[in-house]
Amino acid sequence: MKKYTPSVKNNNEKKQEAVNELKALTYRLERGKHSAALEAEVVSSVLATLKEQAAELENSVGTGEENIGVLAKDALAQIGGLKKAAEGSASHRFEEAAEELGYTLGLWKDVLDGSTVLETEEEVKAARVSRGRRLLDARLAELGQIKASFTENDKRLEKEIAGLEKDLAEYESAMLKEDNERRINDIYRQIKAVKSKIDMLNVRHGNYSACYNLLDMIYANAREILQATDFASEEIAKAKVLLNIDKLKKVVVDPNKAIAVLKKMDSEIKEIAGRTASMDSKVFGLDSGASAVSQDALAYKEELMRRRREKEGLEHTASAENSDIKTEGNKNGVL
């Protein structure tokens, strides 16, 4: 590949080429020129972000000395990848392609603004990972706040339910003491109203609890990925899928949004488990993916148990013999 030579003219040409491609893509998406299988919500979100990113790049001004060759090449290739994803049926692939492009456009803007210098492919790759990690750390913190809000709502509902249960107990006690038929009917209506409130709040309480558990599982797995010492680009992609905050925010009204993320997480965990089982099989001759205990391990455990029983039996026999000796000695007047 011919080495890129930075200049005001060359940089502006590359920038305008990318902006034109972005505008053409947003035009197609606005006109519905994409797969009907894609989620409308995802397409709208990607479209709005692309328009914003195109405008930001177009308005960025550099000195002409910035080496944006690698970034321009990556961005144009990723725009092509996004076009292809728009014709597919997987919304998550379309979303991931848009996010990848967004990272590159953000880096390009940073270079033109003078906030960073990226000239080689290695530098661009490292910067993309660093930028991706910062954004994902922020998403993880936001998910932690969402979890905290569920906990607060759960506590608030628990307090409300406890208060209504006291009201119910009071009404039921009053009914038992009441002889007046009119008053009994009044109290019964109050009891039914309170029970309806308790039932409604219990449903919401259960929903908050279930949603919290979903988010907590996602949070725990995403945090583990982000805390990994070797943070590869492949792991960034996995964390991005888990930390889709827009979907997770809607978990209360649409738990399926979080469940879709969980299914993706579950498949990845199973994949990890499969790799672990394969490694164990090669190194130790064990299959850690199976739920049943291996026969060798079971036989070893049984042998250990047999030895322990044998040892305990010997100790018990020795103790009994010592006791008999002491007893016989006492009978004979021997201390």
Image: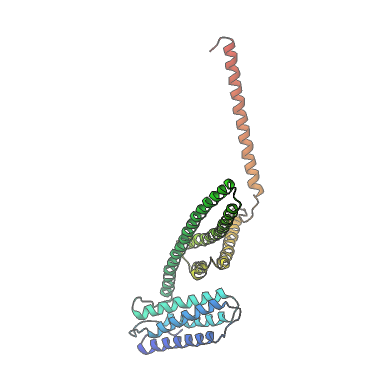
In this rendering, would 237 be left or right of 305? left
Residue found at the very far right of the displayed protein: 295
In this rendering, would 7 be left or right of 302? left
Residue 3 at least partly seen: no
Residue 185 at least partly seen: yes
Which residue: 50% across, 85% down? Answer: 26
How many numbered discs sit on the rendered protein? 0
Which residue: 57% across, 13% down? Answer: 329
Q: Position of residue 334 (x, y in %)?
A: 55, 11
Closer to the camera in the image, 66 or 171? 171
Q: Is residue 13 above or below residue 97?
A: below
Which residue: 52% across, 75% down? Answer: 95
Closer to the camera in the image, 281 or 264? 264
Coloured how?
rainbow
Q: Position of residue 30 (x, y in %)?
A: 52, 85
Closer to the camera in the image, 332 or 226? 226
Q: Quadrant of residue 132?
A: bottom left
Q: Is residue 209 above or below residue 35?
A: above
Q: Is residue 56 above or below residue 186?
A: below
Q: Position of residue 252 (x, y in %)?
A: 53, 65
Residue found at the very far top of the displayed protein: 333
Q: Position of residue 238 (x, y in %)?
A: 52, 67
